[in-house]
Structure formats: structure tokens, C-alpha cells
Image: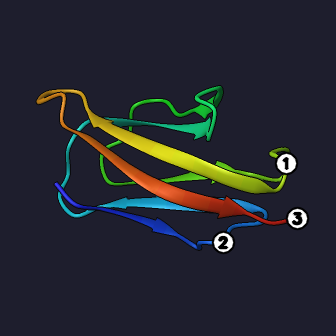
Amino acid sequence: IQVSVYPNPASNKLNIHLSKKSECKAAIFSITGQSITQTVTFTDDVSIDTKHIPAGLYIVNVVDAKTNQKISKKLIITN
């Protein structure tokens, strides 16, 4: 599975797009590993409100619920 995370840098909203339909969950973590936010299970596209997240560098983890495949992407949030 391939994952697109855009826009990057993000300010108000982050979109996550999957290359093929699959049950996934996404989470945003700080560089220190603190969980910032998580999504419900989604199958192709999801949007995450990032207005409440302070500006900085983050990691977006997307995990396939069936295969447990994990994909990590760097994310910059600007306000």
C-alpha cells in the first residue's frame, strides 16, 4: 500500500490518501513520540484537522488493520 500525505507543510487540514482501498488507521506523533491525534478506521481518504496542533515537525503513521503494515511520513505543521 502507498500513502500520500498532503499538503506538507500543513496549516489547517491534513489529507491522507491510500493508493488502494484498505482498512487503515492514522496517527500523528511528535518527534519525541508523544501521540497528538488519531483517526478512526478509514478505507481510502481521510482529512485531519491540524489547526489545534502547534507548529513543528511531526510523524504521521498509517497502519493497515489487516496486514499490520506501517508506513511513516514526516509532516511539518505551520500556523
Name the residue: 74% across, 51% down.
Answer: 50
Disc 2 from disc 3: Cα separation? 10 Å
Q: Earlier in the sequence, mark 2 or mark 1?
A: 2
Check disc 1 and give the amino acid type.
Pro
What residue is pinned by disc 2?
Answer: 9
**Amino acid type, residue under disc 3 in the picture:** Asn
Q: Say what secondary structure mark 3 lies in.
A: loop
Discs 3, 1 touching: Cβ within 8 Å? yes
Going from N to C along the chain, the mark reached first, 2 or 3, is 2
Left or right: 29, with 56 as reference point: left
Question: Which of the pair 76/20 is nearer the observer?
Answer: 76
Relative height, residue 79 to residue 29 (above, below): below
* Residue matched to label 1: 54
Q: Quadrant of residue 28?
A: top right
Q: Which residue shows up at 36% across the image and 42% down it?
A: 62
Residue beneath disc 3: 79
8 to the left or right of 68: right
- Residue 73 placed where, x, y %? 43, 55
